Image: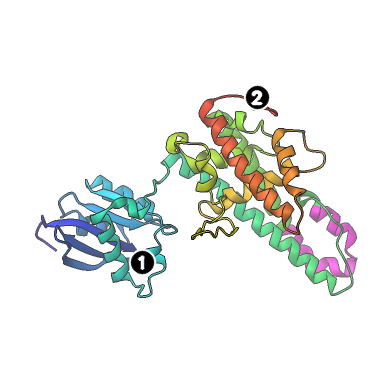
């Protein structure tokens, strides 16, 4: 494309791994141009740098962050659509790159709010989350290796003793007979090395929290919430002012029950599981800690235990999710207000 297009009112771009498909609509909603572009900065600058400032819609994904930044630097208005909320795209029976790109363009042209726009995090928060997610991947790898060792030894009638992850290698070596230790030595050595790297990341997390995020100190005063959870919460949300009410934090992280009310029916459904999976997992783990027998006595713990008493096989599971949702709301409220945590707040 060589000529500057001035009639385009909206552009939809369906981002892929190696290339993207774009559709341009004029003010009347007519498709005036479409095509593919390689997923490189040079290709995007060459293709979209020749357009007048235009409203451009893309879906949130692995590469949407750098694409949005680049397009905004060119002067375009970029709308990052939430794919979980735009059912017209996810549930489309004719889903392909051209159709998705055109649908993004049409929604952006008519009403951008239909795309449930998202905001990407800043560079600082993204770098911190990179370290947090690298640590999480190492923990996942270590867990898989430990489970593999336990499973392989069961075929010999051996059951490894329970142990904390940091003590696993030492206790496993003591429990495994000499004739079986040699074949597993390489696995145990890798588990030990991974554990050392995880501990280094733990030190890094503490250092980052102490130097860059003073709010973390206040948030980890909440029982069950450690530095990792507090730092992940702060960096994932990015801006505490993004929610008008703290209760919206729970819904943002997918801890709100789905709703399918129709007429007089209002069935009880599972949570939406929208938002960041890892942060939601950390909050659920924190909720487990809150409800433990020897955990500090707090209003939140008493509330959660009452939910557990309501009976039914899934009562405790529902209570844990409810406590996790309350934790998200509480952490955001403490973050915004700057107040210290009170185990029994006055109403």
* Residue 302 shows in the view: yes
Instruction: Judge from the rendering whether residue 1 lies leftward or rightward of residue 313; answer left or right.
Output: left
Residue drawn 78% across the image and 38% down it: 295
Q: Is residue 46 above or below residue 343?
A: below
- Number of numbered discs visible in the structure rendering: 2
Disc 1 residue crowd, few under 14, some 14–19, many 20+, Cα 10 Å: few
Instruction: Check if residue 176 falls in the magenta segment.
Output: yes
Which of disc 1 and disc 2 is earlier in sequence? 1
Residue of label 2 = 346
Residue drawn 79% across the image and 69% down it: 151
Residue drawn 84% across the image and 71% down it: 154
Instruction: Check if residue 319 falls in the magenta segment.
Output: no
Q: Nearer the viewer, mark 2 or mark 1?
A: 2
User: In the image, residue 199 lies at what x, y percent?
Assistant: 68, 44
Disc 2 residue crowd, few under 14, some 14–19, many 20+, Cα 10 Å: few
Q: CA distance from mark 2 to mark 1?
A: 56 Å
User: In the image, residue 267 lies at what x, y percent?
Assistant: 58, 60
User: Of 254 and 313, which appears nearest the observer?
Assistant: 313
User: In the image, residue 277 lies at what x, y percent?
Assistant: 56, 54
User: Of 67 and 100, which appears nearest the observer?
Assistant: 100
Instruction: Judge from the rendering whether residue 260 lies leftward or rightward of residue 268; answer left or right.
Output: left
Color style of the picture: rainbow
Magenta: main secondary structure? helix
* Residue 21 shows in the view: no
Instruction: Give the extent of the magenta segment.
Output: 168-190
Which quadrant of the figure has residue 210?
Answer: top right
Identify the disc placed on residue 18.
1
Residue drawn 70% across the image and 28% down it: 344
């Amino acid at each position: 494309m060589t000529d500057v297009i001035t009639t385009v009112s909206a552009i939809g771009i369906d981002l892929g791994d190696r290339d993207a498909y774009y559709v341009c609509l004029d003010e009347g909603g007519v498709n005036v141009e479409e095509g593919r572009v390689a997923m490189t900065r040079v290709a995007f600058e060459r293709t979209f740098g020749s357009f007048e400032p235009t409203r451009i819609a893309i879906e949130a994904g692995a590469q949407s962050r750098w694409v949005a930044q680049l397009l905004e630097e060119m002067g375009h208005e970029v709308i990052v659509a939430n794919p979980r909320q735009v059912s017209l795209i996810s549930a489309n029976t004719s889903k392909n790159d051209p159709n998705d790109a055109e649908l993004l363009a049409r929604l952006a042209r008519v009403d951008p709010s239909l795309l449930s726009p998202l905001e990407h995090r800043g560079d600082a928060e993204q770098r911190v989350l990179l370290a947090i997610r690298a640590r999480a991947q190492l923990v996942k790898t270590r867990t898989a290796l430990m489970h593999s060792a336990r499973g392989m030894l069961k075929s010999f009638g051996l059951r490894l003793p329970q142990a904390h992850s940091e003590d696993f290698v030492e206790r496993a070596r003591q429990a495994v007979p000499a004739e079986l230790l040699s074949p597993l030595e390489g696995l145990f050595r890798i588990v030990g090395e991974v554990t050392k790297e995880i501990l280094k990341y733990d030190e890094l997390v503490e250092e980052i929290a102490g130097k860059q995020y003073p709010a973390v100190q206040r948030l980890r005063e909440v029982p069950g919430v450690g530095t990792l959870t507090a730092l992940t919460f702060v960096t994932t949300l990015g801006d505490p002012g993004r929610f008008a009410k703290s209760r919206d934090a729970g819904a943002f992280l997918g801890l709100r029950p789905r709703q399918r009310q129709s007429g007089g029916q209002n069935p009880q459904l599972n949570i939406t599981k929208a938002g960041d999976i890892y942060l939601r997992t950390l909050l659920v783990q924190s909720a487990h800690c809150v409800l433990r027998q020897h955990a500090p006595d707090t209003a939140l713990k008493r509330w959660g235990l009452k939910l557990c008493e309501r009976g039914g096989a899934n009562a405790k599971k529902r209570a844990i999710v409810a406590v996790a949702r309350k934790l998200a709301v509480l952490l955001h409220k403490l973050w915004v207000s700057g107040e210290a945590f009170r185990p029994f707040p006055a109403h």
